[in-house]
Image: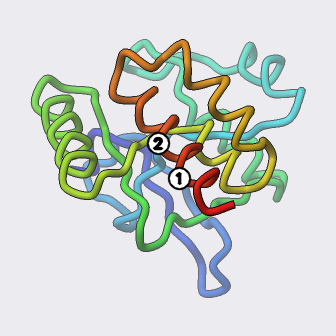
Amino acid sequence: DPERYGVVAFDKDRKVSQIVEKPKQAPSNYAVTGLYFVDGGAPERAKRIKPSPRGEVEIVDLLQGYLDEGALTVELMGRGYAWLDTGTHGSLLDAGNFVRTLQSRQGLQTGCPEEIAFSKGWISADHLANLARPLAKGEYGRHLLAIAEEHRSRS
């Protein structure tokens, strides 16, 4: 469904060659997900962008400026990543169903920064438990507490 997204194309060296907002004919099957890391000059650059024919300031126009300067890089998300668009009622429902299925069938939480911080060694099991206690009435908090408790029982 490329007419709903920004689409990026690559040259033979895997460098970005083109970025197009909502193309009728997509130059590739690589959608721009909407996760951007830009420098401190981005706000000033954005102020200079003229609205598109749809009346919107397009992020693709900002990215195009970086591409023109040779300063744009794109990271491909590989296997194990899922990008869930929520721009329509149907896609929001699809995303919710996907997350619910993943969590209920695999016992995983999505978007769980505390668990990531713990698994990377950035916080201790005690710190994880302290973060989880105020959330313990819900599934998310119980998930975090279970991780902390499992670690303590193995230690």
- Disc 2 + disc 1, Cβ < 8 Å: yes
Residue 98: % across, % down: 20, 46
Residue at figure coordinates x 35%, y 20% from the top left: 138
Quadrant in the rendering for residue 125: top right
Decide: is 100 above or below 88: below
Q: Amino acid at mark 2?
A: Ala
| Element carrying mark 2 | helix
Q: Amino acid at mark 1?
A: Glu
Residue 2: % across, % down: 28, 50
Residue at figure coordinates x 28%, y 30% from the top left: 86
Q: Which residue is mark 1?
A: 150
For this orientation, the residue located farthest to the right is 40
Residue 36: % across, % down: 64, 40
User: In the figure, is residue 56 to the left or right of 93?
Assistant: right
Q: Which residue is mark 2?
A: 146
Q: Nearer the viewer, residue 152 or 7?
A: 152
Q: Nearer the viewer, residue 50 or 97?
A: 97
Which disc, if any, is residue 105? none
User: In the figure, is residue 113 to the left or right of 29?
Assistant: right
